[in-house]
Amino acid sequence: ISAGGVAVGAWPRAAMEASELWVGFVGAGRMAGGLVRGLLQAGKVPASNVLASAPSDKNLAAWRELGCRTTHCNLEVVHRSTLVFLATKPHILPGVLEEIRPAVGPHHIVVSLVAGVTIQTLQRLLPPWTKVLRIMPNLPCVVQAGAMVFSRGSNAGDEEATLLKSLLSSCGLCEEVPESYIDIHTGLSGSGVAYVYLFAEALAEGAVKMGMPGALASRIAAQTLL
C-alpha cells in the first residue's frame, strides 16, 4: 500500500527509549525549531532520529545544520515517526490533518502546538484511536527557557504524558493541566513575556539616562529579571 508516494508497511512498535524514538515535525517554524534544539541539546533524542517537513527550504536549512533530516512531504514525516508534532499555522491545519489521517496508526503519538485548535477538534479530524496531546509553549522556549502546559486527549495515557513531559522539560518548565487552562496560560506566560520585556527595557533606559552604556544596561536589566 502507498500514500502520497511513500510506502506504508506494518505499524512499527511504539518506542519510548530516546535512542529508539523517532520524532517528526509537521511544520518547521521558529517554535518547532526551539523545541528541537532543546531536545537535541539535552540528549533527549539523536538528531538523526528527527524528521521535519515544510513546504519550502526556507526553514528547513537550519534543521539540516542541526543534523536533522528534512522533507517536503508531510506523509513521510508520519510514516517515519512515532511521535509527531503538529506545528503548522492554524488556518492550514485542517488540510494537513486530512492529508496525514490515512497514515496515522495506533502506535502514533500526535502532539499539537497549534494555537486555538482544541483536542476535541484534533480527535474528530484524526482516526478514533489516535493518542492526541495538546501543548502551548511560549516564546522563551526557543532559547530553552520557556514555560509550557499540556493536556491529553481521551486515548493518551500516563505513558504518553510522562514521555512528553520528560522531553519538553529540556525546553523549560512543563506542566500538565486541564485543557481549559491553556487559554489562561496564553495570557499569563505568552503575553506576560512582552510585559516583562517592557519592564526590562524601562530599567535599562533608566540606567542609560544615568550614564551607563546601553548594551551593558540591557544585559544587566535582563539578568536582574532572571
Image (cartoon, rainbow, N blue to C red):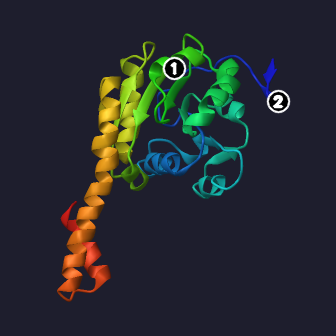
Residue 61: horizontal and vertical position, in percent? Answer: 65, 57
Image quadrant occupied by the N terminus: top right
Outermost residue toward the top in this view: 128
The image quarter in which residue 166 lies: top left
Residue at 32% x, 80% y is 215
Q: Which mark is residue 26?
A: none
Q: Left or right: where does residue 5 sit relative to residue 74?
A: right
The image quarter in which residue 52 lies: top right
Q: Amino acid at mark 2?
A: Gly
Q: Which mark is residue 121?
A: 1
> Which is nearer the eye, 162 or 139?
139
Does 164 sit above or below residue 37? above
> Which is nearer the eye, 27 or 196?
196
Q: Is residue 11 visible?
A: yes
Label 2 sits on a secondary structure element that is loop
Residue at numbered disc 2: 5
Count neighbours of disc 2 (C-alpha within 10 A) and say few if under 14, some if 14 to 19, many if 20 or more. Answer: few
